[in-house]
Amino acid sequence: MPLALLALAIGAFGIGTTEFVIMGLLPEVAADFQVSIPAAGFLVTGYALGVVLGAPLMTVLGTRVTRKRMLMILMGLFVIGNVVSATAPVFGVMLAGRVIASLAHGAFFGIGSVVAAGLVAPHKKAGAIAMMFTGLTVANVVGVPLGTFIGQSVGWRTTFFVVAALGVIGLVGVARLVPEQPRAEGVRLRHELAAFRNVQVLLAMAMTVLGFGGVFAAITYITPMMTEVAGYSASSVTWLLVLFGLGMVGGNLLGGKFADRHLMPLLYVSLGALAVVLSLFTLTAHNKIAAAVTIVLIGGLGFATVPPLQKRVLDQAAGAPTLASAVNIGAFNLGNALSAWLGGIVIAAGLGYTAPNWVGAVLAASALVLAVVSSTLERRTASRSLLVASHTPEPAAAPAAARR
């Protein structure tokens, strides 16, 4: 794999760390700004909404510059946002810093996916995308626990300074290692928008929302589920999340390995198995060992869908894939927000802390149904094209005299 993928992975590591580390530092941030924990939770919500809105916005704004230049601008924006968060004198400024950093998230992964796929041979595209996303998954294993430890030991502001430093390293890496990839000649914003008229692009994005939403329906409420149902102590949640991160790393790499050769079968298996495992989590959540194993499986099966879904969007939006790729990253976060909301509804209805697992199972099963629909439509389209081609008469041969 080219060294340029390492630079993209470093940027992804920093982005993944800043996205999730705030969850472990909410009590410290709330105490420092003298706000409630629910109020501090807007730092999570604001970031997610910033990703959803920022993905298309920043991609459109970057249509007039090269992809490498835009990646550098996005990493610079990411650094600024984290410095603002680290130095915020009041909670409102902290929230603004989180939103600024989030604006870089979707566009970086969206444009980065296009760049990563362009660095390798066509049959290795999903593997290259997975390599970039490895930075995001490793962030959950290393960056988030380490950032939480630093924040709890020497102050949460130090954590955000460290994350900003990671952004600087990512920026330098992109500048030094990523080659220039000028936009295709003749491709304009209208061509990028035209991708959204392709039903296969929309189906892939819907699978992204529902499939990864299934994962976060369970993981969002993992702390009360593990402490109140499984019987773990609150301090054990950190290493349980590390197990989840390890599952994400493994699933991401496997997804990248098989998506180039068996994309749709991989989606069938991973989404179907995810629906089953989430259903079983309502039972295994009552046993410590079984719960830990299930958490690893959820992380692995959930992230096994990421490289194939991202590649699916790139393939279906071929020619002008940048905006569609970025919007699909926003779809992941939209799924997170949707599933967290639905999970909260079933808990508030008195169905218990394991109820969000059923929500997740239904979402994953719905994504599987869409995958089957997508594949069926694709086969029918291909069959019609072959039928039309078989009934198209061959052009008549020119007379000999005319050929001479």
Image (cartoon, helix red, strand yellow):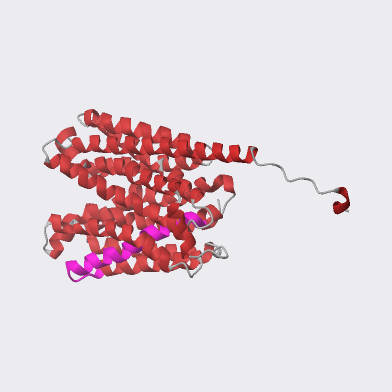
Judging depth in this view, the residue of 198 and 384 nearest the camera is 384
The stretch drawn in magenta includes residue 110: yes
Q: Is residue 10 visible?
A: no
The stretch drawn in magenta includes residue 170: no
Majority SS type along the magenta span: helix
Left or right: 89, with 399 as reference point: left
Placement of 238 over or under 28, stated as above or below: above
Judging depth in this view, the residue of 399 and 294 nearest the camera is 399
In which quadrant of the rendered view does residue 343 lie? top left
Q: Residue at x 34, y 65 (%)?
A: 164
In which quadrant of the rendered view does residue 372 lie? top left
Marker count (numbered): 0
Q: Residue at x 41, y 68 (%)?
A: 61
Q: Residue at x 55, y 55 (%)?
A: 118
Percent position (x, y) of residue 192?
47, 60
- Per the rendered image, the range of residues in magenta is 87-115
Percent position (x, y) of residue 246?
36, 41
Judging depth in this view, the residue of 322 and 258 nearest the camera is 322
Percent position (x, y) of residue 320?
50, 58
